[in-house]
Amino acid sequence: MRTRKPLEYIVRRYDRVAPLYNALEPLFGILPMARRKAVRALRLKPGDAVLEIGAGTGRNLPGLVEAVGPNGKVVALDASRGMLEQARQLVSRRAWRNVELVQQDAAHLTRDQLFDGVLFSLSYSVLPDPRPVLERAWELLRPAARVVIMDAGITETPLRAVLAPLTRLLLQLGPGDPYSRPWEDLASYGPVTIERFLLNVYFVCSVEKPVTPSYS
């Protein structure tokens, strides 16, 4: 099990790499297909409100904005000022008026609204202590809405032995836990749906919040 880095270290690394992050994505094998799968798993509808935790430079924003439509709302949260500055430039270029960018430690997440979906995209494995963040995200989720985690790791791939040295090299560019198993954390909230792809390196896992029966 890899020891997770403190938030201050993570923020410094991402602030430094932020201007180059989008160009570096191919080095990590991050394909647009993975992002589309994550957004699709949220099952958003026009007019919905969605929260992305660890929004980075905003690579998922086009898909999220399209999913919720002009009457919906996207809240994009990240602790890195540098990454959010890149996202802010994207929002400005696209003239999106329904995107709110929030610089905040996800462990101290506070919102007055409920959401129709919460997305962790390549961020759950980076969080210093992800379980309390997941718990707070669950509290902010409406009934019948979904938490979706899209991430990468080498615990389930048949190429684990081959990829381990490369993974150690890539971790010099971006902090994260390649042995993270978020589906185990999600299982405490209900049945988990998992889709694995790209030789089981990448995965999208999700759980739906049950509708609490009302009694009268």
Image (tube, helix red, strand yellow):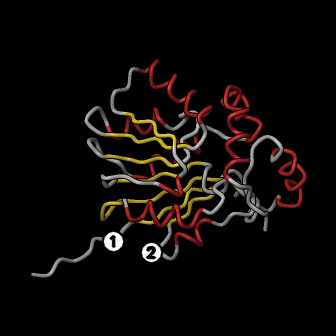
Q: Is residue 61 left or right of residue 139?
A: right
Closer-to-camera residue (102/19): 102
Residue 149, x across and y down, in percent: 54, 56
- Disc marking residue 210: 1
Residue 208, x across and y down, in percent: 40, 65
User: Residue placed at 56% from the left, 46% from the top?
Assistant: 54
Quadrant occupied by the C terminus: bottom left
Closer-to-camera residue (128/32): 128
User: Residue placed at 52% from the left, 22% from the top?
Assistant: 89
Residue 129, x across and y down, in percent: 63, 63
Report the residue that reaches farthest toward the left.
216
User: Residue placed at 74% from the left, 40% from the top?
Assistant: 13
Q: Is residue 114 left or right of residue 123?
A: left
Can you say whether 65 is above or below 172 in the image? above
Closer-to-camera residue (30/108): 108
Residue that badge 2 annotates: 190
Q: Is residue 138 left or right of residue 21?
A: left
Residue 210, x across and y down, in percent: 33, 71
- Disc marking residue 148: none
The mark that comes first in sequence, 1 or 2, is 2
Report the residue that reaches farthest toward the bottom.
215
What is the distance, in whole Å, between disc 1 and disc 2 at their CAs?
Answer: 8 Å
Badge 1: residue crowd in 10 Å (few <14, some 14–19, many ≥20): few
Can you say whether 215 is above or below 86 in the image? below
Badge 2: residue crowd in 10 Å (few <14, some 14–19, many ≥20): few
Badge 1 element: loop
Report the residue that reaches farthest toward the top.
93
User: Residue placed at 63% from the left, 53% from the top?
Assistant: 151
- Amino acid type at mark 2: Gly
Q: Are marks 1 and 2 in contact (CB under 8 Å)?
A: yes
- Amino acid type at mark 1: Pro
Quadrant occupied by the N terminus: bottom right
